[in-house]
Image: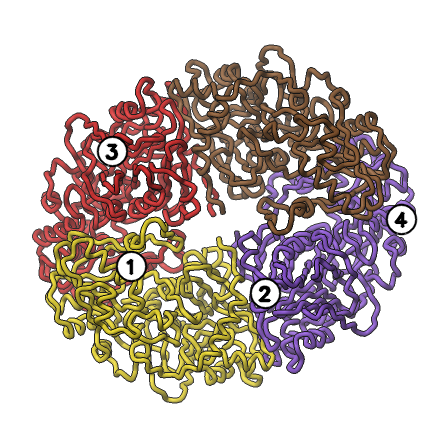
Chain colours: A yellow, B red, C brown, D purple
Amino acid sequence: MHEGKRRPWTGEHPREECGVFGVYAPGQNVANLAYLGLYALQHRGQESAGMAVSDGTAVRLYKETGLVSEVFSEEILAGLPGHLAIGHVRYSTTGRSSVINAQPLLARCSKGTVAVAHNGNLVNADALRQELMDGGSVFQTSTDTEVILNLVARFAKEDLEGALAGAARRLAGAYALVAMGKDQLFGLRDPSGFRPLALGYLRGGYILASESCALANLGAEFVREVEPGEMVAIDRDGLRSRRGEPGGETLCVFEFIYFARPDTILGGRNVHQVRKDIGRQLAAEWEVEADVVIAAPDSGTSAAMGFAGAKGLPFDVGLIKNRYVGRTFIQPTQAGRDLGVRIKLNPVRDVIAGKRVVLIDDSIVRGTTSARTVRLLREAGAREVHLGVASPPYRHACYYGIDTSEKGELIAAGRTPAEIRKAIGADSLHYLSLPGLTRAVGRRPGSLCLACFNGEYPVPIPARPAGKYAFEEAGALELERARAD
Amino acid sequence: MHEGKRRPWTGEHPREECGVFGVYAPGQNVANLAYLGLYALQHRGQESAGMAVSDGTAVRLYKETGLVSEVFSEEILAGLPGHLAIGHVRYSTTGRSSVINAQPLLARCSKGTVAVAHNGNLVNADALRQELMDGGSVFQTSTDTEVILNLVARFAKEDLEGALAGAARRLAGAYALVAMGKDQLFGLRDPSGFRPLALGYLRGGYILASESCALANLGAEFVREVEPGEMVAIDRDGLRSRRGEPGGETLCVFEFIYFARPDTILGGRNVHQVRKDIGRQLAAEWEVEADVVIAAPDSGTSAAMGFAGAKGLPFDVGLIKNRYVGRTFIQPTQAGRDLGVRIKLNPVRDVIAGKRVVLIDDSIVRGTTSARTVRLLREAGAREVHLGVASPPYRHACYYGIDTSEKGELIAAGRTPAEIRKAIGADSLHYLSLPGLTRAVGRRPGSLCLACFNGEYPVPIPARPAGKYAFEEAGALELERARAD
Amino acid sequence: MHEGKRRPWTGEHPREECGVFGVYAPGQNVANLAYLGLYALQHRGQESAGMAVSDGTAVRLYKETGLVSEVFSEEILAGLPGHLAIGHVRYSTTGRSSVINAQPLLARCSKGTVAVAHNGNLVNADALRQELMDGGSVFQTSTDTEVILNLVARFAKEDLEGALAGAARRLAGAYALVAMGKDQLFGLRDPSGFRPLALGYLRGGYILASESCALANLGAEFVREVEPGEMVAIDRDGLRSRRGEPGGETLCVFEFIYFARPDTILGGRNVHQVRKDIGRQLAAEWEVEADVVIAAPDSGTSAAMGFAGAKGLPFDVGLIKNRYVGRTFIQPTQAGRDLGVRIKLNPVRDVIAGKRVVLIDDSIVRGTTSARTVRLLREAGAREVHLGVASPPYRHACYYGIDTSEKGELIAAGRTPAEIRKAIGADSLHYLSLPGLTRAVGRRPGSLCLACFNGEYPVPIPARPAGKYAFEEAGALELERARAD
Amino acid sequence: MHEGKRRPWTGEHPREECGVFGVYAPGQNVANLAYLGLYALQHRGQESAGMAVSDGTAVRLYKETGLVSEVFSEEILAGLPGHLAIGHVRYSTTGRSSVINAQPLLARCSKGTVAVAHNGNLVNADALRQELMDGGSVFQTSTDTEVILNLVARFAKEDLEGALAGAARRLAGAYALVAMGKDQLFGLRDPSGFRPLALGYLRGGYILASESCALANLGAEFVREVEPGEMVAIDRDGLRSRRGEPGGETLCVFEFIYFARPDTILGGRNVHQVRKDIGRQLAAEWEVEADVVIAAPDSGTSAAMGFAGAKGLPFDVGLIKNRYVGRTFIQPTQAGRDLGVRIKLNPVRDVIAGKRVVLIDDSIVRGTTSARTVRLLREAGAREVHLGVASPPYRHACYYGIDTSEKGELIAAGRTPAEIRKAIGADSLHYLSLPGLTRAVGRRPGSLCLACFNGEYPVPIPARPAGKYAFEEAGALELERARAD
């Protein structure tokens, strides 16, 4: 189960789920807009936030670990004048977080002053880094972003626009990228379009954002999505587009299932409505007798509502989520193994007791939280607990920007649904079918990345050694960090 | 309002003063239990948290501004050994908060070492303070709690238990109090029972908590509520009760409407179910044509579900609340007047657009947020917006522990519903009737404090001068505070 | 040996060595003056700093753990308007420090709003506290200051001035006190005059300060010392004095030996010159052959210069003190036992090597640092190390405000000078004689408190049990503290 | 001056850039040694501290703004295991400081993992940076260190040792450099030997440090100084040396005058003794009648002692320096223009009043503090004030790593001594002669950099435009910083 204030899955690669933002608005002071845009994307990353702002002459950068509302103050925003900005939010970790991996990355190179912010994961980052190092490049972080920046710097004869386009041709994997020089804003999306990137228009200026909800927040008009393989360049001459080779789009289906905010429009569809359709599809596939339908808050809510409506069952609030968990919450060891769930999730006994309960969750990754939730519901008096999962069994690691478990930690890897049901302790368990999922999402199966469910990776993943090497080296930097408050 | 430290209240909902917790559990280390109990009560106060813990020999105190999860660490809890504890969470303010007003208050006096934590508001605090000062007492804070402590210290011939009982007879107003000596835990509730206080049992120990949800969190058994006018004393001899004069209970109705957590049991009823009944009652009273019912998140959700069910209308998620607002969120001034709402509340356009929307909120205090929300829904394409309020017009200031506006700021004070509707900009507006409210709550009208709706104050409020005096003097302390990190 | 940034001796009583400041200057904003005054007194206490400021209407308080320069900012000073202020600096501890024991103490009582700051130690604090508790008083700290405040509050028929005078008659022990109401400043010194308190005049206003160096810092004129047993009251009517019973003054001799800043004038004599005279007296008493005289920095410098001059020996800088120790300095355990001294004190080998060295220190308390310093000098090549101590053997605990060791930890308690020399490892060791000390200080022996040297306590010390009780109870409060950044 | 981050220098003394430290000690855990070494070098830089530590497999880095004792805790040192480390302290600024410019710099490149820490200033940094950018390098900071690292990375066919040697041949200006790979420690000094670098030996391991005092602190044996133009490489095969072209050494004379700690041995001479010799030389050159000699604390002390001894005049402590200034000290504006000096320096009136005073300072840069000190002494009653300066007139900006004023701010630039005397308000003023300085230092004039006195720059300084460009660009990074406190 994923939670709203998401904690990282203990991943094998230091991969990112992030949000990016960009704005070009002549004559306006855009730091405030970037602040609000990042704030709307906060659900995509809570570890750090940052923005680079240019007034056409100087590019100023501010980034720090923490939430957008913690990192920026009015004074700091006032110190970032200019009409052109990019910003970034980075995913949260349980342990120490490091300002060195915060984005955007700002640097000087042959293209002048350049800032880059990135959402996704390159599958050839290690190979590119090695190639660049062989050519004399120096790497101070273990981020893909620094690889991209060094690649850009190598294009001797191109201007920044050409260098970015040239660099993009070398990148393999998932990326939604915003970049800027002193006077230009760029947005790029990988040819598979794994990660979303929306384009908006606001009072004579352009906005780029990982999700359309950031545009809505600013009162900006949604123009369209940046297309897979497209690069847009925005400057005083307006917006130009370069489109890459026509290739197949494979948008990450997990954006629909879990990542995106319910009010976001993705691929032309509202995510909340897609999730309700997913719930309806689950209802169509699953025969189950029950008295009440409840959601694993908050991520299962939309699907649970769709499910309940389709089944004609009452939807109710059976679990209350404590909103005050915070990043420093401690789990006193003496207090027993189930306390972790008990303090975050509180059953509404009156809704549960004596009932046959259907619990809808968006997905199951490791299964431990699901098992505890089922136990919690039984203790609250549920007569039966049936677990409906609004996605297929999650069986394969993601290499395109989601920080997931080792395959061995995925409860669905190598287990039948019956075994999973038993491990979780539910009276019954139903996963949405893969065809059902794509039908509910309303897209051609080929236009979605379903790798975590079916193991079919749209972009080939290189063999392990390189990856392992990258990780080990990255450890070198792990202690470099801002003082913990 | 009497308390000095109080900051201008600016939000749409009344703020609850505090939550209190107590535990007596021989042979157990209770700091962890107190931590979890306070954590479950966090919704009652986010400004500061504290606990006093006794091992029978020494009483140790730790309190600090911040959330429970921020204030306490494992190291701090480990430094608070003992089987007896009381704790407190205090309401949040927009500005600086002060550790000097944090609770519990720990002191030495003729009764030995005593700690006290308090939820409520005494209407005779100024008079008592003056009387005590005339007799030589010294006051270092402007809290009611310090008044109570000094009153206790004056009972020359009584032990702590007798002194608390004697002091309680002098107090007028609202209080739910937990107190402790080195070896005894006490719980007191005012004769009107304005503020709730639940009694629980856990593995040989007793627990006191403002709400039953804290008992559930610990896996404790709910025993009963401490009765209005009752004092319970818990020590090695078990639990003793002293009951005061039989008087009329007038429990604060706003606990049902807004304060209490939905999973709490109050006066024998689950709060979530009461709120659904309130929604149903609203449906019975209000003729309205609509396509969809949505809630003002999160406080209107239960009533909205009840309303939608009774009306046979679809309930949907029309507004997404940003969970990352934080205490330091800044509202860039340039960004326009409605941005405050826009960044906290995000409409799901697909749910709203073209629809006749019923928006259910639990109450309207100042009306500004309601007006902005209505405008937000219209901008999202709502054809009509009908505002249903799950309580009657809020017209009178509270003197029993709720931090609300001056009467002049209450939108319903001196306005007809038609005028309010117009001010808010809704197509129609319906307040729940007062009889409808008491019916839905399921209690005799006389057993509830309804003063904020009907101006009938169960305990008389003294004239203003004393209050003014207290406020002015209290200003003396306003800069004493912990360093703002 | 005492060091400039003094660490506490591990004391049995939570006693204070502090600095106090007061200013009354009609028409001026005095927070800045108080800031600078406290800054000049910083050597008397590094744990916390605070000030209360009155504009005649409201009294505002700000206090915090940390150095004066850390606690106050321009913004904070700007928030403390008024013409009347008292301030306090409190001694440093190695462990956690607590804002609850910071001063001034501000409270409301029968005398109105009163603030008090105190330097010294009452020997009857426990008895007074018990008496006051018996009468209904409540104590939230374990400070003497709170005892004084409660005593003041008990004087029913007196105004603040009369109540202070009445309270002073009940106090036994050492105190230099500043107090204030909304419109009056007071300064009191105990009848024995253990602790110093100077009176100054600046542009129509009066200033009180523990040491004259704070007056000089402000450009104020030194008027005189507040006399033992005197109380001065300063308000719009000017300065009034009440003198107590004529009694014998016994000023703490350690103010001359170590506490006071060298530029301070105490009892009419400049402290630096007194210390040089002490060094000369030591030279007269001690036959020693040497090549160079060095000081234990910084506290032995004045005496060493006097000694060298009298002996006709070269004075040189043989030990460099690291100025960056800071309060958080860690002493890596693996690095061996002498590292503590080695990193704080660095020998100048060229000055030391091959020489017969006289090392002058102001006093020896526990002897461990002295032993390490001697070893350090030998490692740096000293041929001989002779230790001259600018005071007699320190054999008795102080009960008048100095936080000293248990008697058992005093190296001179129960040891002959020969045994001490052996323990410290010096080639020879000479303590100044007691008659020599008083002669060099230039005062009648009877006018000095010499208790730590001769055990003759000018004010009787009560039996232990009360003291022990006080300590144990005080433990109750020890965890209450400001968040450790 | 070239570096971007530099803040306007406002103090009276030139600020030293940095201190560097390195240790290679097989079988030992060296983080503690690096901590103590950096602590001994703290006087060379108070802005930030950092160290990189290798256990042969991973290199871990920790750096932060603040003093060594603030930056590192036992926990952090424990997280830095290994036998090989380099460390750095960076100079202090008045304004905000930035972690991005903290050192060491750790990166991965074609030479593997490399860390570098640097003291000095390259005069061709801009040219090298531009050349490297033209070749595709990316710069994330404005430090020389990053230029060096990128240069190293470009040596395709060399191992780290060869690449460092190759890079060094391209560097012009001043540098004392420590660098490390996973298993090797390197120390380099520029051919002119502007900045010092000492080599020590400790229990089977080697140590490198900017000053010998850091060796003494660790109990290490001083072996020798790294020679100008030399590179030492230390690894499991022991110590190897590469010596560059024989060139003229021109050690910075200000190391003797002001920077180095008095107990340091530099060029074979103890710095304290050199300074005493300087004082003696000043005495020989200057006819002055006086009653007492005092020092501007602390930097004038050694010279003042030498001067007084040579003149047969008494040396005394006439000025007390407040040790608690701290980095956050505020200077209340209302308090008048001389308060800045008054609160930091306190005259001992008894030493000064009625006397003809000789005040010895090590140097005069801007003269403002000198003027205030003279005024302070007059106010304290000095009959005459004669200012002796232990160095020649400081007339020329430094380009080799000292952060001094623009030439226009140097009081001696374009002024005769008579004019300076008048500006400062002294009765007489005497600068040490340049021949006198070199004689006292005891070195050939040609072996010292005397550029700040005579304008003869041993290494040519490029024209300004490049410098200006670098500064402007670097502004891009100025807001990137760790959270202030």
Residue A261 drawn above or below residue C313: below
Q: Which residue is mark 1?
A: B321
Q: Which residue is mark 3?
A: B174
For the residues labelled 1 and 4, the Cα–Cα distance comes to 77 Å
For the residues labelled 4 and 3, the Cα–Cα distance comes to 83 Å
Amino acid found under the numbered disc labelled 3: Ala
Judge by depth and name the residue closer to the eye, C218 or B277: B277
For the residues labelled 3 and 2, the Cα–Cα distance comes to 64 Å
At horizontal 71% and vertical 72% (from top left) the residue drawn is: D124
Q: Which residue is mark 2?
A: D55
Q: Position of residue B31 (x, y in %)?
A: 36, 42
| Subunit of label 4 | D
Amino acid found under the numbered disc labelled 2: Asp
Q: Residue furthest top?
A: C245
User: Residue D281 — which label?
Assistant: 4
Closer to us: mark 2 or mark 4?
2
Q: Position of residue A34 (x, y in %)?
A: 42, 65
Q: Element under label 3?
A: strand
At horizontal 13% and vertical 50% (from top left) the residue drawn is: B278
For the residues labelled 2 and 4, the Cα–Cα distance comes to 50 Å
